[in-house]
Image (tube, rainbow, N blue to C red):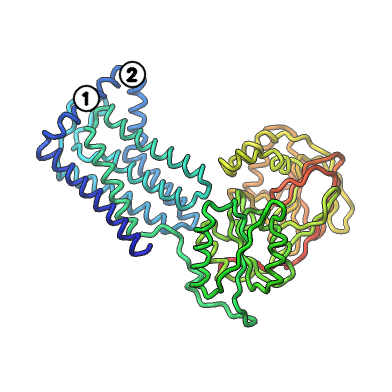
Amino acid sequence: MTPASRNRTLGWAALAAVLFGVLGVLVTRDRAPLDAFDVEGRRLEDWADDSSALVDVLRVIEAAFGTIGMTVLTVLLVVVLFLRRQRWAALLVAVVMAVTSVATTVLKVWLGRDRPDWQDTLGLHTNYSFPSGHASSTGAFAALLVMLLVLFVRRASLRRTGITLVVGWWLLVCVDRVLLGRHFPTDVIGGSLLGVGVFLLALAFIDPRPRLTAAKAEPLPEVYASEKRLAVILNPIKVEDVGQFRSIVSTMARESGWSEPTWQYTTVEDPGTGMAERAAVSGADLVIVCGGDGTVREVCAELAGTGIPVGIIPAGTGNLLARNLDIPLYIRSAIDVALNGQDRAIDLVEVGGDGIEDTHFMVMAGMGFDAAIMEGVNEDIKKRIGWVAYVVSGLKSLMFPAVRVEIQVDDEEPTTHRARTVVVGNVGFLQAGMPLLPDATIDDGVLDVVIIHPRQFLSWITVAMRVLRKSPIVDETLDRRTGSRVRIKASADTPRQLDGDSIGEGRELWMECIHGRLLVRVPR
């Protein structure tokens, strides 16, 4: 955090503290100016009391987001952030929620304001009233969630939806306190000011963003002297603000000793191949590509065999290659790895089939159910809700009809199977870390094949459990193969996909793994 941004954050924290202090004086020393406002809480409690169903709902909300409920939510959020290697964000959450809890308790005792005498009789609260503990904890937690959404959710529509839900939840809890008569309205306002103020104060000193570790490490030895010429290939529809993205990359490149980057944008007509070719011809020492798996595939395929490393800035929906290479999804961290990480030689897979030109893929190819999912995704829905669109399409495609397929691995005799889907992978993990091909490694020179044939709808549950457990058992429901060359022939036209992009129906795919063909930048 820069000194200017820290000062702004401290300024907002000071404003929240001043407002809280003024409110605390008015409600505990001389309440006359706010009596009329607080008395409205009685009218609201009387209104709610007329509906027993509403009161029951309010009591559930009260219990769910009390001390125990908020402690559970806090622990869960800290654990999730820690497991996702967002340790500074986890620390901020823990500090904010702990300080808010202690401050609320101390201020309640110090200010000593009694509860309203009209509160709901069931579960009567006898401790002090100002500030509201529910409001302070949910206010702080809501502020933390909004911060995390702004930091880590790239899709604007999802971010706006998330923020709306979080703010709505916080307001619901605040209204609950007044409708049950547990607190005066000013108690709820004071609690919210306290929670947000603690969050802002902590944010000024604990930066939740991932640290840029690669730039601080010792420089890697260079095999040859380079002018550190940098080329960037960007799919412009994948970033919200192209100008801001260019500024971030240019600044970080300069700080890491790279030249001012040259920029090229992909188009519908050319999703990256021509741009990668021009970057190679111009003598780039590093090419950074920002986009989804499709853009990354096009650029990597063109640069394979050139010896020019590729830095990947994942900006798509799946980002499967980046996930399997442990490249962070946070943009600044991904840029840092691209500029300062180490090179890793990975495999590339040549692929061909009926009705398609010979091409390459980096992650996975498939025929059947998985390809039907990609084919059935509504692009408008995908733009609005991201990966959830794949879930919707997947539910529609679960009972994709089984087809008879012939599979040949290397020079072995072909085998015949019934399958709803056949997936050939260069990597092992799908979204959410699902280990579809747990033994697959991107630099082992071998392809991993999985053949899935659940006979009934509920059999998908068995398949999912076996996949999650990384079960070594193979049978007609879930079978596996490995080899450097794979050929699949279907008895009927079947949907096909490469790296999550539908390539239309066909009856055949052949694939060959090219060992160590491409250099990519990965974390040290």
The answer to which of marks 1 and 2 sits earlier in the sequence is 1
Q: Residue furthest right?
A: 413
Instruction: Give whichever of 282, 467 is nearer the camera.
Output: 282
For the point 60% across and 54% down, which residue is it? 236
Relative to 257, is 161 above or below? Answer: above
Q: Name the mark on residue 52.
A: 2
Three-letter amino acid code at the position of disc 1:
Arg
Q: Marks 1 and 2, Cα distance to the nearest angstrom?
A: 17 Å
Res 202 → quadrant = bottom left
Q: Residues within 10 Å of mark 2 (few under 14, many from 20)?
A: few
Residue depth check, mark 1 versus mark 2: number of the one nearer the observer: 1
Three-letter amino acid code at the position of disc 2:
Ser
Check if mark 1's residue and mark 2's residue have beta carbons within 8 Å.
Answer: no
Return the residue at label 1: 42
For the point 50% across and 74% down, which residue is it? 217
Q: Residue furthest bottom?
A: 225
For the point 61% across and 74% down, which residue is it? 229
Q: How many marks?
A: 2
Q: Is residue 214 visible?
A: yes
Res 462 → quadrant = top right
Q: Is residue 438 visible?
A: no
Relative to 444, is 102 above or below? Answer: above
Report x, y in % for residue 77. 43, 48
Report x, y in % for residue 144. 38, 48
If the image is split into quadrants, where does the C terminus sit?
bottom right
Report x, y in % for residue 296. 66, 58
Label 1 element class? helix
Relative to 443, is 61 above or below? Answer: above
